[in-house]
Amino acid sequence: SAVISQKPSRDICQRGTSLTIQCQVDSQVTMMFWYRQQPGQSLTLIATANQGSEATYESGFVIDKFPISRPNLTFSTLTVSNMSPEDSSIYLCSVRQGFHEQYFGPGTRLTVT
Amino acid sequence: GQSLEQPSEVTAVEGAIVQINCTYQTSGFYGLSWYQQHDGGAPTFLSYNALDGLEETGRFSSFLSRSDSYGYLLLQELQMKDSASYFCAVNGNRDDKIIFGKGTRLHILP
C-alpha cells in the first residue's frame, strides 16, 4: 500500500492569504485526488489530479481558488487561495492503487481566522 | 449524479455483531467500497465489492446486491477499537473518482 505524507500537518492562517499543501507519495501513482472534510462530516472531492493533464475540478470548486500542481507521479500540491473562515477544514490527499483501493494522507488541518 | 445513503449512527455492544447498510443511486456502477476512519485519523480501505455476494476479511465482511443497489458492512466480534466512522463509497467506472457516503458513526458499548 502507498504511504502518503502531507505538509503542513496543520496551520492557522489569516483571512485573505494563501496556503500551499504538499502531498508526497512513496511510489509512482497515476491517479491522485484532493478531498476536504469538516470534522465529523463526509469527504468532499475537490479535484482529480492526474500527472500529465490538467486537474479536473468538481462542482463548486474552481482552479482560481484551489490551484493544483502535479509535476510528477509522486508529488502534488493544492493551494487554498484568498482564504476565508469558510475554508477552515481538513484537506486530504489520496491516491488510487489498483482499480479501487484508495489511500489517504494524514491530512492538513487548516484554520482561517 | 451519484448519491449514497447510510445511517448516521449505530450503537452496538462489545462482542456483538453489527451491520451498516448502504444504498446508492448512480448513473454508472463499477464497485462499492468501505472505509474506516478513527477520530483524528485518515480513512483506511476496508473492502470492495464489484460482484454480488459476500466478501470476508477477518472479522469484517461486505455484501453487495447490484440489482437492489444495496450493500452492507458486517462487523463481527466487535471490539472497542472498532469505534469509528464507516463510509461506503462508489465509483461509476474503473478509472472514475470515488464518491463517499456521509458516513456512519459506530458507537460500541462495553
Image: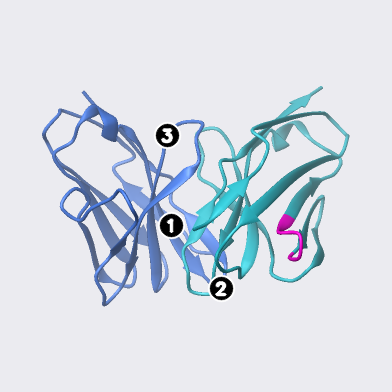
Chain colours: A blue, B cyan
- Which residue is at 46% across, 31% downward? A39
Crowding at mark 3 (Cα within 10 Å: few <14, some 14-19, many 20+): some
Q: What chain is tagged by disc 2? A: A
Q: Badge 3 is on which residue?
A: A38
* Discs 3/1, front: 3
- Precedes in sequence: disc 3 or disc 1: 3
The foreground one among A15 and A107 is A15
Q: What chain is tagged by disc 1? A: A
The foreground one among B1 and A16 is B1
The numbered mark at residue A94 is 1
Q: In this view, does A19 lie above or below A101?
A: above
Q: Do labels 1 and 2 share a chain?
A: yes
- Precedes in sequence: disc 3 or disc 2: 3
- Which residue is at 64% across, 66% downward? B31
- Which residue is at 55% across, 74% downward? A98
User: Magenta region: which residues?
Assistant: B66-70
